[in-house]
Amino acid sequence: MIFPAAQIALLINGRIEGDPQAAVSSFGKIEEAKNGQLTFFANPKYEEFLYSTQASVVIINEAYELKQPVSTTLIRVADAYTAFATLLSKYQEIVQQQLSGVQQPVYIAKTASYGDNVFIGAFAYLGENVKIGNNTKIYPGSYIGDNVSVGDNCIIHPGVKIYHDCKLGNNVTVHGGTVIGSDGFGFAPQADGSFKKVPQIGNVVIEDFVEIGANATIDRATIGSTLIKKGAKLDNLIQIAHNVEVGNSTVIAAQAGVSGSTKIGNGVMIGGQAGIVGHIQLGDGAKVNAQSGVSKSIEPGKSVTGSPAYDYTSALRSQAVNRKLPELEKRVKELEALVKQLLSEKVS
């Protein structure tokens, strides 16, 4: 597929500087792009490559002022990074539209149903009463359990497992190896020291426009629903425990873990490898730094770091003091010696 700069500019509401017929057929990084490729420039760290890139077309911020001439065609937009993301999404849609129909072999229960223009890849399994919406793609090797519903325009990548009774909304993307609806970690301690399993009879509900990375695990609720709300984005290798709620447009980075029944508000940002205990609340707009251990509720808008996590600004000050401890110890010893000397002179 070949696209001229003029057509690309229309898609992203851009203004062309250079040849409107400059054609591209693929994408490349600005430092590696070749003739016939499209790239973007948004990060000042890559400024030197703007003037040496071999890319045929570069998307660039409207406000950026050139420091020297460029040999490539520019498309100026309000936000180059967002515009580039929009183009990648359009390209992905075009590629995915080529996938349709049901490959063989697959297993589709007689009571299962699916909408128009779906793709169901080989070795997929659709259980009893499964409902798949229009334009949804189920890639090979996926398991869709009994009574699961998947909405319109969803992408279920290879090897995803969605257990019985779980519900996915529209425009949901789930990457390979993720498990949705496995049992929550519920065990009742017994008098003899053993543990009795508590049946997990709830489900997982994932609302519209959620994206879940590879090899994530989202446990079903003990009773009720584990809930991932509209627009949330979960990275790879994340654990969401039973009865957790993740708010609208919240983002969670890789290897983070959230314990049972914790409620995470809207627009929260959780860094990689953060650990969050159960039965607490993270208020809207809270920020949890990477590798933080959160052991108590966080008020809306507050940023925390460390383990146990506490106020971000105070933590940075403490870290600065810690780095100076050897020097401070030396100064304290010098002051103690001076005080001792002064007291000795006073006595004499």
Image: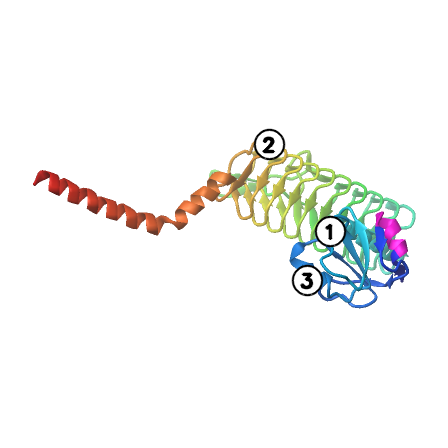
Q: CA distance from mark 1 to mark 3?
A: 14 Å
Horizontal placement of 304 versus 267: left or right? left
The quarter of the picture where residue 157 lies is bottom right
According to the picture, the residue beneath numbered tag 2 turns out to be 300
Please provide percent x and percent y for residue 180: 70, 46
Q: Amino acid at mark 2?
A: Pro
Which label's residue is closer to the chain start, 1 or 3? 3
Q: CA distance from mark 3 to mark 2?
A: 41 Å
Which label's residue is closer to the chain start, 3 or 2? 3
Quadrant for the C terminus, please.
top left
Which label's residue is closer to the chain start, 2 or 1? 1
- Element type at mark 1: loop
Query: What span is colored magenta in the figure?
Result: 6-14
Please provide percent x and percent y for residue 217: 66, 48
Q: Which numbered circle lies on residue 64? A: 1
- Element type at mark 2: loop
Can residue 1 be spotted in the picture? no
Q: Residue at x 75, y 65 (%)?
A: 53
Horizontal placement of 177 versus 139: left or right? left
| Residue in front for this viewpoint, 317 or 131 | 317
According to the picture, the residue beneath numbered tag 3 turns out to be 48
| Of marks 2 and 1, the one in the foreground | 1
Question: What type of secondary structure mainly makes up the magenta span?
Answer: helix
- Element type at mark 3: helix
Q: Amino acid at mark 1?
A: Tyr
Horizontal placement of 176 versus 35: left or right? left
Q: CA distance from mark 2 to mark 1?
A: 36 Å
